[in-house]
Amino acid sequence: MASSQCALQGIITLYSDLAQNPDKDFGWDKGVKNARNHGYKEEWIEKLPTAMWDYCAAVGNPFELGEFPEGASVLDLGCGAGVDLCVAALLVGEGGKAIGVDITPLMVETASRHAKEAGLNNVEVVEGNLENLPIENESVDIVISNGAINLASSKPKVFEEIYRVLKPEGKLYFADMIDISEGSCVTSCCSSSQGDWANCVEGTLTKEALIELMGEAGFMNVEWTGNNHYTTAPTTAGSTFRATKGYGNVKERHWENVYTTKDMSKVGWYQKEPSISLLLLQKIGSTSKDAFIDVGCGVSTLADTLIDLGYRDIMLLDISQSALEIVKKRLGSSADLPLYRVSDVCAFSSDKLFDVWHDRAVFHFLQKEEEQLAYIETLSRSLSPEGHAIIGTFAIDGPDSCSALPVRQYDEDRMKNLVRDRFDLINVIEDTHSTPSGCEHKYCFFVLRPKY
């Protein structure tokens, strides 16, 4: 974490310097000549303020990769001084919108000023991190980036975020530096010159690695479109890529990707034994005769343990079909005992009432009030009058994200205020979970009962 924070501060420092000193030699090509070398059209250069082009440090041309229809919404990641952002705004017209996100406050100010000077009223610039974009789900048609993804500390998170914010069939067009070394011990991080500094933030990847990351994030039609003349070190080259987001619910696609590409014994929420869940079942006096639902069960071994304890009335609910298939395969001859339901918990409905509702870590992913209220309504409909709900979340001093998604932390007061109209909070247990990587995550488990 410390190294990532140091790298992030290094990025902000470097690009703050560029924002204030566009004429300074930073060791890489920039300016209007650089734009022309990448094929930026003369009409764009003529329409935008001349001084803006001094900041053009493009490593490629994302506008050659596909159409930018009038009326479309475009998100520019790491927009810098706003050159590509303003070009995008020109292309989509007054009926469209161009949104820029940048981590450097001075660049946000500079891009906003440039858009105003260009007379563009369809531009918005916000400060933010590429790994946790301040953008709504499925809200943009096209995402572009130019030399910014390379600087991210977690490139998988960046692609997951891009996938989240794109509309179904949305397009990703980006240019970035790639590693073109061929088995040499000399990497793109070996030089100490300022021109090579950006390659060393978190490591420049090969085109194959970037293509794999996009595929893991759920993108289709992933394509490397070629290298160009731009370089920042002997082992790097400017390169361009494009990809398409498929149809499907963004949550569903995210978790399908997780359960089909990740090693489940290494994810942060992995537990060999569901010890805390069994302790809570004991505390509420649950017996093997109870009707039990495990919400967001994933590939947890709780079902295995319950079957061993004699439970037979079990429903496993998850948004990922692949997760449930993994559980079925693991249960072997016992696979026919549970019922399996693929559904978002907020849309779940059942004629059956459950004595125990168990949710180890779904509720804290619900960020919006309407999602939280929908969950509580579903829980209220599904729980028997004498039943118990066990809900686990990250604690107030726990992580603020999980699986590259933001979460909401809870304590007793926050949970009580949220459920008080429907449920009594009868117990709170704090727990520390040790992840496979050795980190400690603080949880709170809440036991609820319906109000009489």
Image (cartoon, rainbow, N blue to C red):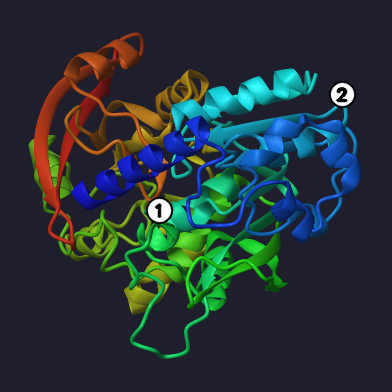
Which of the pair 204/229 is nearer the observer?
A: 229
State which tag comes first along the sequence, 1 or 2: 2
**Of marks 1 and 2, the one in the foreground:** 2
> Mark on residue 316?
1
Which of the pair 280/208 is nearer the observer?
A: 208
Relative vertical location of residue 302 with respect to residue 91 in this rendering, above or below: below
Q: Residue at x 47, y 32 (%)?
A: 128
* Quadrant in which the C terminus is drawn: top left
Q: Is residue 288 left or right of residue 347?
A: left
> Mark on residue 101?
none
Mark 2 residue element: loop
Q: Residue at x 45, y 70 (%)?
A: 261
Residue that label 2 marks: 94
Mark 1 residue element: strand
Which of the pair 88/356 is nearer the observer?
A: 88
Which of the pair 403/297 is nearer the observer?
A: 403
Amino acid type at image mark 1: Leu
> Residue 253 at what x, y percent from top left?
57, 54
Amino acid type at image mark 2: Glu
Marks 1 and 2, how far apart at CA:
49 Å
